[in-house]
């Protein structure tokens, strides 16, 4: 079974194909991501209008490329017309190999989601394929179920560090991204329980806001991750939010504490504007503040995971989403948790369609009813 995944929930236009490769094995045949992140950097965050326009420009070429990358061996005659805005006419033999389409229905930006969902609906009708609606947050951990890559990836020398064995149930998943911080206990592909989530900012959002205070470009997570290696993470003590249950999170207080700390370290009081901080702080001060913030944020996540690990004794732990690319999180989680932890390849931590195709594969495999391609609607605040 081969599934085409389509993802357009935020600023990445992505398409990918996955294929079953035997018991508990799944092969990634292609993974195409066109990001509009550079266009948003100047604004310090994602501009929905710009993201939607970029999706419109990229969606068809990205899907074409995903099909070509996946099946080029069988379709040597197929060539992608540069800058083509139309699906390639020779694509029928490629489409005949696809068994189903999976598309992100939500959560995300409405104008971005619409492009992916309307494209997928049209293709599902035109190519007569079943269509599966995917929850983006649910899909993130599924990047860990991909065990190998197809032949073409080897030809392209694309290195993916994939899991040797797919995670086992019960599986504890920490999903950490720019929009979400959730701890979920999966009993099976279909049965899962949300143990807790953030009550305010997502951890990735806190990374991005702290990065902005320190004058780093958007998205700030990777910069904080890098610069923290040069700083002293024990230099400053920052508060950790205490909530009613151990599995709920709050990062907005930490963000404010970092602002107050940065103002103080720069020699000013709380009235000093955050926009002046990048100039007022030295590189060494920024590195110490970034490292102290990162240690506190990551310890908070790992402490919650440790508690859930002890309470629920899962067979596997998965950490996924953009923040799962973080080196400190990878280090602390691997050191402090007794159950083996799996992370997706770095390229599959941030938004991609491979995770969408993979969840679609399991939906198809477990007999879930496909969506109606004539009526599937986007849901910007879709819950798990
Ligand atoms: O999963 P993702 O691509 O998009 C959402 O679904 O939100 O996650 C993007 C988030 C951004 O907040 C970005 O700053 C963060 O992931 N991120 C990181 C790292 N790489 C990306 N945060 C910390 N360390 C990183 N290395
Ligand atoms: Zn995401």
Image: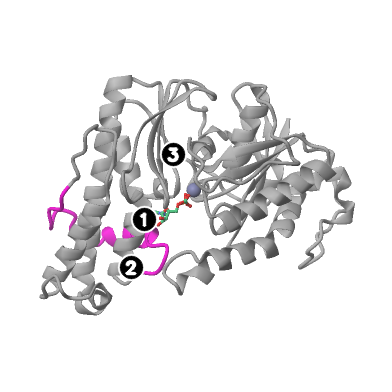
- Disc number at residue 205? 1
Viewer-proximal residue among 295 and 211: 211
**Figure quadrant of residue 366:** top right
Of callouts 1 and 3, the N-terminal one: 1
Please say whether residue 281 is one of the residues in the magenta stretch: no
* Residue at screen point 57% across, 33% down: 147
Residue 30 visible in the picture: no
Describe residue 321's horizontal placement relative to residue 290 as left or right.
right
Q: Which residues are magenta?
A: 216-239
Between the C-alphas of marks 1 and 3, the distance is 20 Å
What's the magenta bit mostly, secondary-structure-wise? loop
Describe residue 28's horizontal placement relative to residue 268 as left or right.
right
How many marks on residues?
A: 3
Between marks 1 and 3 in the image, the one whose residue lies nearer the viewer: 1
Mark 3 is surrounded, within 10 Å at the Cα level, by few (under 14), some (14 to 19) or many (20 or more) other residues, namely: many
Residue that numbered label 2 is attached to: 212
Please, what secondary structure does the residue beneath circle 3 have?
loop
Name the spot of residue 124 as percent of width and height, x first: 77, 42
Between the C-alphas of marks 1 and 2, the distance is 11 Å
- Disc number at residue 343? 3
**Above-or-below relation of 305 to 73:** above
Please, what secondary structure does the residue beneath circle 1 have?
helix
Please say whether residue 230 is one of the residues in the magenta stretch: yes
From the Cβ of disc 1, is ligand 1 less than 8 Å away? yes
Describe residue 20's horizontal placement relative to residue 71 as left or right.
left
Of callouts 2 and 3, the N-terminal one: 2
């Amino acid at each position: 079974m081969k599934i085409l995944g389509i993802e357009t929930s935020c600023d990445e236009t992505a398409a990918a194909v996955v294929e079953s490769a035997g018991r508990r094995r799944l092969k990634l045949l292609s993974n195409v991501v066109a990001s509009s992140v550079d266009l948003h950097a100047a604004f310090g965050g994602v501009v929905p209008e710009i993201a939607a326009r970029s999706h419109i420009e990229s969606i068809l070429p990205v899907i074409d490329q995903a099909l070509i990358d996946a099946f080029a061996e069988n379709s040597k005659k197929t060539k992608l017309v540069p800058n083509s805005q139309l699906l390639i006419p020779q694509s029928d033999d490629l489409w005949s190999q696809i068994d189903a389409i999976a598309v992100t229905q939500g959560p995300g930006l409405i104008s971005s989601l619409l492009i992916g969902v309307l494209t997928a609906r049209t293709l599902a009708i035109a190519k007569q394929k079943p269509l599966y609606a995917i929850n983006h947050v649910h899909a993130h951990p599924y990047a860990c179920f991909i065990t190998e890559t197809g032949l073409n990836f080897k030809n392209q020398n694309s290195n993916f560090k994939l899991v040797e064995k797919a995670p086992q149930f019960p599986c504890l998943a920490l999903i950490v991204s720019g929009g979400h911080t959730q701890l979920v206990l999966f009993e099976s592909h279909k049965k899962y329980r949300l143990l807790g989530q953030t009550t305010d900012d997502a951890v990735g959002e806190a990374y991005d806001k702290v990065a902005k205070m320190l004058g780093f470009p958007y998205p700030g997570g990777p910069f904080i991750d890098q610069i923290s290696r040069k700083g002293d993470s024990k230099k400053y003590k920052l508060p950790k939010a205490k909530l009613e249950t151990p599995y709920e999170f709050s990062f907005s207080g930490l963000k404010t504490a970092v602002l107050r700390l940065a103002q103080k370290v720069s020699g000013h009081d709380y009235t000093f504007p955050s926009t002046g901080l990048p100039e007022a702080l030295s590189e060494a001060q920024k590195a110490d503040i970034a490292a102290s913030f990162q240690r506190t944020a990551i310890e908070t996540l790992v402490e919650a995971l440790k508690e859930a690990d002890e309470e629920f004794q899962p067979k596997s732990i998965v950490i996924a989403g953009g923040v799962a690319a973080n080196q400190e999180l990878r280090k602390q989680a691997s050191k402090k948790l007794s159950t083996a932890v799996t992370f997706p390849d770095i390229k599959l931590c941030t938004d991609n369609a491979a995770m969408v195709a993979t969840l679609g594969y399991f939906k198809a495999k477990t007999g879930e009813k496909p969506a109606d391609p004539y009526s599937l609607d986007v849901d910007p605040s879709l819950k798990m």
